[in-house]
Image: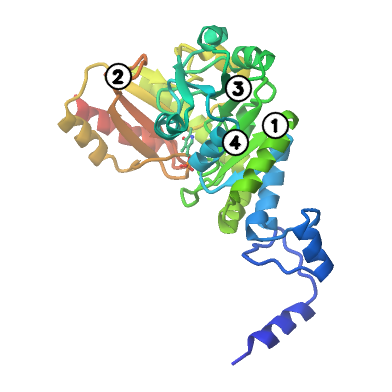
Amino acid sequence: MISNQSTHAGLLKELPTRTISPPLYRASTVLFDSYEDLKAADAGVYNGVTYGTDRLPTQRALERAMCELEGGALTRAFQSGIAAIIGVLLAFTKQGDHILLCDNVYGPSRAFSTNILAKFGIDVGFVPSTVGSDIEGYLKPNTRLILLESPGSNTFELQDIRAVSEIARSRGIVTVVDNTWATPLYMDPFALGADVSIHAASKYIAGYSDVLLGTVTVTEAYAAEFDRYYKMTESFAPSEDCYQALRGLNSLRVRLRQHESAALMLATWLSGHQCVDRVLHPAIPEHPEHALWKRDFTGSSGLFAFTLKSEPSAEKLAAFANGLEMFGIGYSWGGFKSLMVAGRHARSLPSRYAGQTVVRLSIGLEEPERLREDLDRGLLRLR
Ligand SMILES: *Cc1c(COP(=O)(O)O)cnc(C)c1O
């Protein structure tokens, strides 16, 4: 049996090993070279990593990669996409503030705001899913933050980020964009004037449905404030997940191209299908905000939805879903496996699709023609 002592000594004698991917660091404790370094860490002036929650090198490598890709000033990683959103909401608000969320925002973002932020005396309001310069009418003197998600990941309405952020900036309001759908490759929120860009890296960035991770990137104006919040909460993202997300970033461009072309083929086919009412995909010309998509985006990803000409019974909808051979039934999206969710859009939510069944598809990396055949057979079961 090897004692810990000798294992450790052996490791230290090894030559540095050069690998293409960065090493995976796991740690609570990080050793200081000297007592003087410890004292520098105590005083907050140490240059290196002080502890596991101080963002280990694997996490820092991912943050650097995302920051460069997004063209921001500072990126911090979180243990999930929703943790990243919650981090942003808490970092930039205080008691007595008013915030605005777009109506089509990710459900848990809405739930956190109305259930938890409201509890701390934050006034939470909503703006239409297609808001633009009409944001003006929703602002209050104490509005501090606007959370946009364009397109919203269930009903795919777009906001005019440029118009909203221009008005917001003139009043010192933080414009936040959840940019998960487009990834950093297909839309640049900072070029449109936003201050904060959020990604659920669990989706396309990690790409294999086996990672939960989120990132937040901010402009220079908000870097110090956000860095301080992150330090104070001692948030961190697990090294393994940062490592997987870094691997995902290396293939993001080619994967997205496939997601994009397969989804466009299927969306176009569905828009001509006799059972389908509307296809909710911003890159399809019939989409109501198609012009906005063309102005602001350089591509589209693999997530879209459709509505049906006649409302299916619950039994028929179940038969449609259960009979699919290529599509898994499950939350989340952006992975290699195609997924579906479906449900009647709540009548209580202001939406074009209120009361209608929305079938959402995440198009994976399978042979597109096989996906089409599977959907074709599925739609027969809906009739
Ligand atoms: C999935 C999702 C999130 C949350 O990401 P998790 O990592 O699953 O917590 C946030 N925003 C959007 C638009 C999403 O689709």
Circle nearer the viewer, 3 or 1: 1
Q: Which mark is residue 222?
A: 1
Report helix, strand or loop for mark 3.
Answer: loop
Amino acid on which disc 3 is placed? Phe
Q: Position of residue 77 (x, y in %)?
A: 61, 46
Report helix, strand or loop for mark 1.
Answer: helix
Residue in the image at 18% along x and 30% along y:
314
Q: Give the spatial CA distance, label 3 vs label 2.
A: 30 Å
Tally of marks:
4
Q: Position of residue 227 (x, y in %)?
A: 68, 41
Q: Give the spatial CA distance, label 2 vs label 4.
A: 30 Å
Q: Which mark is residue 370?
A: none
Q: Give the spatial CA distance, label 3 vs label 1.
A: 24 Å
The relative height of residue 346 versus residue 8 in the rendered view (above or below) is above
Residue in the image at 50% along x and 51% along y:
211
Report helix, strand or loop for mark 4.
Answer: helix
The relative height of residue 118 versus residue 74 in the rendered view (above or below) is above
Q: Which mark is residue 297?
A: 3
Give the residue number, with chain letter if any, for mark 2: 348
